[in-house]
Image (cartoon, rainbow, N blue to C red):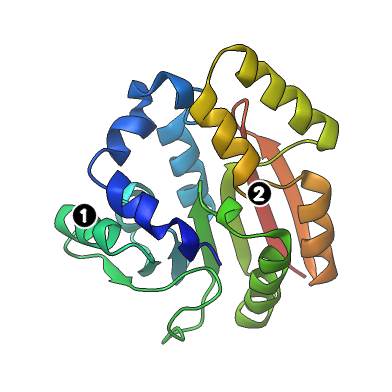
Amino acid sequence: MGREFIDMFDEWAETYDDTVTGQDPQYKEVFDKYNEILQTVADAAEGNTLEFGVGTGNLSEKLLAKGLNVTGIEPSKEMREHASRKFPQLQIVDGDFLSFPEPQHEVSAIVSTWAFHHLTDDEKEQAISGYAKLLPKGGKVIFADTVFSSEDGRDQLIKEEKDKGYDRLVQDLTTEYYTTMEVLRNIFQTHGFHVTFKQMNRFVYLITAEKA
């Protein structure tokens, strides 16, 4: 359920913000338009909001600035501590996409950026099934993450990065659980959501799913 990556994120906590601001050439395109994407996700959220994979709190900052009631959920102890130092007002708890404390208020929006790929496709379906039970009609799941347009698109993208010598990025793309738009569309529709995809950069799509 993504917790197999906790050690990596504990180690990454202190340098994560450097990566997302483009200081790592291999990941520069992955995080292209980073702040714009975060703002787009925050703009779409309303009401009581659950944020999964808080990391160092960069999306949280924009959600809080909008005046939303935010509960952050983050499995990495180091990331939680880093985010809490940056944003002491943020309520942040230990949890992940599948296992988290029961919300104290009705949830209107569930958000996440650059994190849902830590779940296998089966786990993604488990998570979305749970969100369908948690959200009221009109409630939204708003994610931004790397998604492949198709299996052929996946193979082409990986080949292009391999040709650049971006070995760390290629390892990431081939060992984590990145999925396709078709898979995600089917999962969301199966659980009663209307879902749309908007490409935000070469790797990342904005995924907006509204409960029917």
Residue 54 position, x and y percent, is: 38, 57
Q: Which residue is mark 1?
A: 82
What separation in Å lies between label 2 and label 1 (alpha carbons)? Answer: 27 Å
**Helix, strand or loop under label 2:** strand
Q: Quadrant of the N terminus?
A: bottom right
> Does residue 138 show up?
no
How far from the left and from the top, in percent, is residue 124? 67, 64
Q: Quadrant of residue 18?
A: top left
- Residue at the (45%, 83%) spot, across then down: 103
**Which one is earlier in the sequence, the residue at label 2 or at label 1?**
1
Q: Residue furthest top?
A: 164
Q: Quadrant of the C terminus?
A: bottom right
Q: Which residue is mark 2?
A: 207
Q: Residue at x 61, y 60 (%)?
A: 119
Q: In the image, is residue 29 above or below residue 136?
A: above
Visible residue check, residue 119 = yes
